[in-house]
Amino acid sequence: MEKGRVWHSNRGAGFAWIMVGIAVASLAIVGVILYMASSQTRDSYAGRGEEAIAIAKGSDVGGVTLEQRASQVVEKRKQDGVEVTSVSWHAKQGDESSYYVTFSWEEGSLRERKSAVWRVDVKSKKVEPYNSEAKGIVGTG
């Protein structure tokens, strides 16, 4: 060995890389398990859009159902001389047990689309307005 050079062993480096590999593999396995668990929770609530719509329509809004209140809003617009068409309800799944339930209609000669959206949790049956149109319908906006 030359004078002034220090010899280092590489035996420990191989072991360290093995440990890094094990740690990375462990993290990947934990990640896959967590992803599968969250997917199963979401999937257990998939396809329950009709249930979410029924929960929303049946929720209480000052002594009447949300469905009745939404109909009152449409009828009021008609009484005011506004043409109202294409009234519908539909739902789209959000996170896990939540759905976004939309009551939509078109009004006026230009068929301006209006939509009121509520966040509905099918697990807890909680309904909360999501946008300003929904808040207006339930009287909180």
Image (cartoon, rainbow, N blue to C red):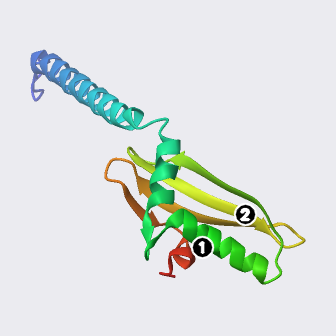
> Residue drawn at (77%, 81%), measured in percent from left and top?
79
In depth, the one of 17 and 108 nearer the eye is: 108
Q: CA distance from mark 2 to mark 1?
A: 11 Å
Residue pointed to by mark 1: 133
Decide if residue 104 is on the left or right side of residue 96: right
> Residue drawn at (33%, 28%), measured in percent from left and top?
36
Which amino acid, mark 1?
Glu
> Residue drawn at (74%, 78%), measured in percent from left and top?
77
Per the image, label 2 sits on a secondary structure element best described as: strand
Residue pointed to by mark 2: 105
In depth, the one of 137 and 8 nearer the eye is: 137
Q: Position of residue 22 (x, y in %)?
A: 19, 21
Per the image, label 1 sits on a secondary structure element best described as: helix
Q: Position of residue 122 (x, y in %)?
A: 39, 48
With respect to residue 14, does 108 lie above or below? below
Decide if residue 140 is on the left or right side of residue 123: right
Disc 1 crowd rating (10 Å Cα; few below 14, some 14-19, many 20+) is some
Which amino acid, mark 2?
Trp
Quarter-wise, where is residue 81 in the image? bottom right
In depth, the one of 72 and 17 nearer the eye is: 72
> Residue drawn at (47%, 81%), measured in percent from left and top?
140
Tell me how many marks there are: 2
Quarter-wise, where is residue 59 in the image? bottom left
Q: Are marks 2 and 1 in contact (CB under 8 Å)?
A: no
